[in-house]
Image: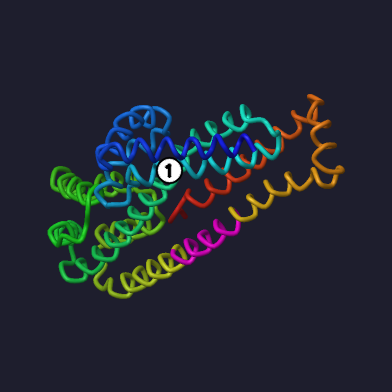
Amino acid sequence: MEFIFIIVGIILIFIVVYRNSNGKDFYKMLGQTFEPVYKKIAPFTYTEIRKKIKEMGQDYTIQQYIGQVLIFATVAAVITYFYFYSIIISIIYAIISIIAIPYLNALRCKRIYSEFIFEQIQVYTTNTIMEFRTTQSFVKALEGVYNSGVLEDPVKSDVKIMIDLAYENGTINESLRYMESKYDFFIVRNMHQLFLQITNEGAKDSTESLENMSQDIDMLVESVYRDREERARFQKKFIVFGMVLYCMGILVQFLVGGRETYMKMLDLWYVQFLIHCIIFINSFFLLKGEKYYNENVGAE
């Protein structure tokens, strides 16, 4: 009961502070306070791609960050309270759950960024093939794609570097190696190999080869989008399953004879240690599932 009063008190303090200040200023103040700490905790991949995520309008707002903090802290505190019936332990777990937010958001940003890059690579390969059919020159095809405005940075800037390298070296070899080192995709390597073969061997009719390459790209893209949908369905079921596991731990106390018997068992150090292990293993299980959902999007 006292735990509920504490939660209610925290919420009331939040409401009073918010009502006594301008809403936007309040969120700005919180953002300025916590953002430096957030950047230090977040993995380096998050800080590298956050600028692009902001440009895409996919970054969380301060309000959304605060909402995540409240949800994670409340869920963690409530669940662990019914595990240990200890306010101190619940607060500790609430803080630990908040620390996990930067990691989860970094995974999310990485997934969005990798999806964006894959879509840009799809545009790059498809349009380069289309331009080559007209120009019959790989460099001219690159220039056509670059000037068409269909690409965005960083891929657009890398295509410009490819063009400069081709004119500087007099061959496309260095350009191809540069692009493949930046974007290690199967469709990129295969398309480059095809253009290299056409350029070196001087193939008279490359129409059929280019058509086959276009079909391969379409099939690969279709499989990647199908994989995204399957991952999204997996994530929803996985989170529900993880929460059920947390609740199953709470239901165990009814199997041992009720709360009084369970409280006596909590006096034993190894029982508490076992419960901590269960919570951490289940949390690790959920984090691994989130990592699987967010990583290697479009990878081959």
Residue 263 in picture, x, y percent from top left: 79, 33
In the image, which residues are magenta?
Answer: 225-238
Please tell me which residue is depicted at 84% across the width and 47% down the height of the picture.
255
In this picture, residue 51 sits left or right of residue 86:
left
Q: Nearer the viewer, residue 218 or 55?
A: 55
Q: Does the magenta stretch mainly form a helix, a strand or a loop?
A: helix
Q: How is the image coloured?
A: rainbow
Please tell me which residue is depicted at 52% across the width and 40% down the height of the picture.
8
Residue 258 in picture, x, y percent from top left: 83, 43
Q: How many marks?
A: 1
Residue 15 in picture, x, y percent from top left: 39, 41
Residue 237 lies in the magenta-colored region: yes
Residue where numbered disc 1 is placed = 105
Please tell me which residue is depicted at 32% across the width and 61% down the height of the picture.
122
Where, by quadrant of the figure, is residue 280 drawn? top right
Q: Nearer the viewer, residue 203 or 278?
A: 278
